[in-house]
Every structure is written in structure tokens, then in C-alpha cells.
Amino acid sequence: MSSRLIAPFALLGAALLAVGWSIREGQLPPADFTFNNGTEVKSFDPAVLIDNASGRIAWALYEGLVRLSPEDRTAMPGMADSWEISDDGRTYTFNLRPGAVWSNGDPVVAQDFVYSMRRFLDPQTQCEYAYQAWYLKNARKYSRAMRGLEPGDPVEVELHTPPKGASPFARGELVYGKLLRVEEDPSATPNELADDDKYTEFRTFVIKPEAAKPETEKPGAEGEEPGDGGEQSAGGELRFRVNADEGATFADARVCKQVLLDFREVGIRAVDERTVETVLQDPTPYWLELLGFYPLSPVNQRCIEEHGPKEWVKPENLVTNGAYRVEFHRLRDRIRLKKNPLYWDAQNVAIETIDAMAVESQETAFKLYETGQIDWCEKTPALIAKELLKADPPRRDLNPAPYLATYFYAFNTDRKPFDDPRVRRALALAIDRQEIISVAGAGEEPALSLSPPGLPGYTAPRCPPADPARARELLAEAGFPGGVGFPKIEILYNNNEGHATVAEMVRKQWRRNLQINVAAGNQEFTTVLKNQREQNYDVTRRGWIGDYMDPNTFLDMFVTGGENNQTGWSNAEYDRLIRGAAKEPDTKKRLDMLRRAEEVLMDELPIMPIYYYVSRNLVRPTVHGFYNNTQDSHPLWALRIEDDASLPNDYFPAAAESPQAEPAAADEAEAAAAQAGAAP
């Protein structure tokens, strides 16, 4: 099918659109390569990112100890050019690449990775992905701060005031010692003491200070010893109260910013300037791949401490170590990336300038692609993709493939009536997934599990398929016969035509099958993320792409209190199985424990799986180095442009092949080779 046959989708208003976009560009010279990134990035700080659009940019700006292959997303040398793994699988020793530098010319050294990991785990950084580093020895305890400490633990107390001679935004002076006890305020009520959000308000931390300055930290300027830091008793005890207000006073204690486990107890250290060692709590087969995940990227300490938490991420201040740097950022328009000439592999980075467009409308992005204004449309609208797949001759620029990602709805189990598992099961049984994907999809498969097909050695347990009659029975058992008395609820989703279509179909199916009143509301992506984090929703659209090839990447999200749980759901047996799997060295036993955990999840249904994703990239035939891979992730450093579109290409199948095969049946998909992804 030629492009003129898709005029109802693409060309209506395309001329006006092109003119409008040109006006927005002004006199801006075109980039060498332009793609649609789907939405605005959350930040240029990799530690706080959780979404796919921000991750694409972070992977271009930063590079970890390893980078991930564009073909199969396995670990390959990055800032480290080699590494060794101990026989017990717990100690990894990384040898840094000689000559690697930051974009300001600073050498990349081992301490950069120690600093960045400490910052990543620091509770005050508020990283939702912090748990991905809890595989490191004692990382979880450090990250949980005051709540995880026990008498006898070595601790570091961060004061409000930076050390003398430090940069203006450096971390506060550190006082080291051993935790002796935690004293509870005698005037506090049992409810106040039990309130986790106010844990530090009613407690005093008593430590015995360390006599000498630690070897691996510099609490003060060169040659200084740490101050006494607190109110000292006759027995040599220091007393601290944690308070966000530096000016607060207490009669018997000094105010500090936080009390943490001594970071020297965490399993990462700089052996020397060129060597980083990580020590894991237990063997973790996917640790290398995790180290290539964008939130664990290193950041430049000098840049952060000189400019501060809000200013260091501005393009004019930003210091990075990846293949690209930010030339400028136009809000709700584009990020212009420019090749970093100081990158260690700059000679193999082919594209000089890249524009990442923040176009939330998939239909608008498709029109930009069809009118030649972008070279890669990262998500073709489902209805348009269906038409393109019928093209004769076939459209070689669309080559969909399944990958390791699941589209699902989450229930706020802290709100009634979603605190009742019968209600959640009723809602899940009342949707027809096949009907949804027949309208909103383009090759997707109905999902009856959170973990998608394709995980090596793992077959996910499934929740029951659609059964409206049983759904009505369960709703009646929960106290809402015929939907009577059921409160009006809202489905929250981020701005996107596809999400809107799914929400409208689910709304109608729940109304039709359960006689309940449902609304659907959309917000900007960053606002949706905020409301999900604060559990300010009834039902919300979510999607998850596996960060590595293991079911744990999906399942460990929903442990009690998990940063990405965001449902309020808690189950002791589920937690026990996930914790046990993390320590189980036998692969078969470990996967069985994860399968049993997913059985619990699919029985309780704090989430409702809807479909497994397929990629829908539209890529110009002149773009090379673009692969269909398990995470639908395409590093910009690997791309290149060839003027001759007829040259053999990694993404486009040979003309004799059929690039649009029929979607695999569910049982065939389970046996398919590994597929994977990151956070849609």
C-alpha cells in the first residue's frame, strides 16, 4: 500500500502541520537525525528516572561500567574495558578504561562510581529504582536509613553544614561512630511512634563516635578531623535528632540531616583510581545487565556540588560521560543532542546531532514521519499500524516484534472498594482482552500474567480469563449486587490516543458487565507518575518493560513497600517467596519460587494484566544499527545514516521474507526466544 492510501490517517492536515512545526523550529538548522521521544523527559539526572523516554536520553548522555548491546542487550565493555567475577559469583572487579574522561575533561575514576552509587542509594535522593542496587551487600540497609539500623551498627551522621573548604552544595559533614541505642520520646503516643512517615520526629539516636577519620571518606577539608558533632555525655556518647530544619534546637541533642549505615559497609569500593569492586549479598546472574541500566549511571560529583540539586542538570552546566551531550532543551519541543568529542569511542559514533522530539500524540508523530520531518517514529498508532501491515507491496519501514513488556492496570488497594480482593477479581474477570486488542492493538497478545512470554526457563502462572457471570457473583459477594452501591471510580492514564482507547473500552466493559459507573481521566505523564507515586488514584494505567531477562524484574516491584509497588498491596507469603528467590542459588528452585509468588499475585490481583506489548517502530531505510531486540531499546551511539537505502540493514527483513508475519498464538509465544524492554 502506498502512502497515498493512508491519507485518512496521515496526510489530512499534514501540510498545515509541517508549516506549524517549521514555525516552531524558526531558523534552527536541522539535526542529522530526528526521532520522536514520545513525551518530555523528567530530568537529566539518571538516578531519579523511571520512564522510557527519559531513559533513552540518559543512555545517550551517560555510560556505566558496562553498556548494553544494541542487538541483544547483553553486557559489553563500557567505562570498564574488562572485569573479573569471583568463583562464588559475589565479587565483581572492574578495570576502568584508560583515558576515559567526562565532558568537562575530568578523568573518569573509580571514586566516581562509589560516589554515584552512594548518592543513588541515599534516601534523600529519592530514587524509585534504588532497590535495583539492593543486590549489593548492605545496600538495602543503607537505603532504608534510620528505620533499618540496629544497636551495634557502624553509622555515619550527616550534619547540615558542609565541611570547611567543600563546594557549596557538598554533602554535610559526616560524623562516624557506632549506634548505641535509639531512644523514643516518652511523651510520644503509640500511634505517633508507629507512624513510619514520622519515624524520626520522636527518636534520638545515640552513638559512640569513631576516634579517627575514615580512610575512604573526607568529612572535612584536607588535614581536618571530624567535629564532635553532637551533645556529648560523660560516657563519650553523642546524641542526634534528625530534623529537616537546620535551625531546630533540642535540649539534649544536636540536629542532623540523617543517620545512615556507614557507607563503607556497602558492597562497593574504589580499590584504586582505576579499579571498582562490587560485592553482592547473594549471587545475582543479571548483575552485569543491571549495571548497564540508566539509573545506575555515574554522575559528576564536582558538577553536582558546585551547582546544586536544581542547577547541575541545566544543559549549560551538565557534565556527562556518554556518547552525547545536551546542546539545548526546548520544553515541550525537543532536546538537541550533540556528539561528545571526548567520549572514549567517539570515532565510532556516526551521527553528529540528534533531535529528540517531545510529541505525545502518536498520530502527530506519524504525520511528522510521513512528511519527512522525523526519521524514527517510536510508536506507530495501532490503527495506522494495522493498515500499514496490510500494505502491498509491504512497508519495509515497519517491522513489529514482541518484546518483554506488559500493559496493565493497577488498583489502589488502600482505597475502598479495591481493598477487597473479590472486587479486584470481579473487575479483572469483567474485561475482554481480545476485544480490547482487536480495537486498540496491532499484533499484541492478551495478557493473563504480569511476566510476559519469552523468559528463559520460566512459564508464568495465569489469572482466569474473561468470565462476566463469575465477575457479577464476586461483586455481589463483596456487597454490590448488580453494581448497586458501588462508588463511581476513575481510570487514570497519561495523554495518549492508545491509552485513551483502552480506557474507554475497559470503562464500557465494566459498565456493560457489572453495571458500575466508571469515568476515565487523562493527565500529562509526569503528573500521572506523581499521582501514582502518592497513590492518588482509583485505577491507573501502567506498563513495565523488563530491565533484564528474568521474571524477578517484574515481580520484585510488588513486595511490601516496594518503590514501584504504588498499589498499597502487601502479602507476607509473596514477600517471603521473593526474598527466598533472591538467595536461592539453584536456578530451577529459584524460578519455582518466583512462579509461586506470581501465583499469589494473580490470585490477589492488585494489578490487572491486559496485553503483552509488541514494538511498532517506523524507521527510515537509511537508518542503520537499529535492531529489534528484547527491550525495544535502541542506543543512539549505535545508529548511523547511509544515503543508499538499498544497503543491507539490521532492522529491515530481506525482500523475499514476510516482515509482517501473523502474531504468534499464546502457546507459541511462550516457547519463543527471549524478548525484553524498560518502562513504557
Image (cartoon, rainbow, N blue to C red):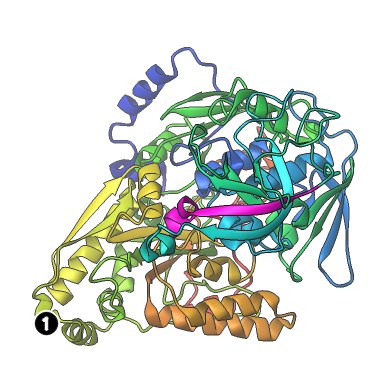
User: Dot 1, how many residues are within 10 Å of its Cα: few (below 14), some (14-19), or many (20+)?
Assistant: some
**Residue 17 at x, y = what percent?**
34, 28
Q: Nearer the viewer, residue 178 or 145?
A: 178
Q: Nearer the viewer, residue 609 or 317?
A: 317
Q: Is residue 202 magenta?
A: yes
Which residue does the image show at 68% across and 57% down from the upper left?
A: 179
Q: Amino acid at mark 1?
A: Pro
Quadrant housing residue 553: bottom right
Residue 563 vs 53, above or below: the answer is below
Q: Is residue 608 magenta?
A: no
**Residue 66 at x, y = what percent?**
76, 50
User: What residue does disc 1 label?
Assistant: 481
Furthest toward the front, the residue is 234
Quadrant housing residue 577: bottom right
The mark total stands at 1
Residue 564 vs 370, above or below: the answer is below
Q: Is residue 491 visible?
A: yes
- Left/right placement of residue 327 relative to residue 427 reads right
Residue 610 vs 253, above or below: the answer is below
Q: Is residue 73 visible?
A: no
Furthest toward the top, the residue is 27
Which portion, as a residue range, is magenta? 196-210
Which residue does the image show at 75% across and 59% down from the upper left?
A: 288
Residue 98 vs 550, above or below: the answer is above
**Residue 121 at x, y = what percent?**
63, 51
**Residue 92 at x, y = what percent?**
84, 59
Q: Nearer the viewer, residue 414 or 528?
A: 414
Disc 1 element: helix
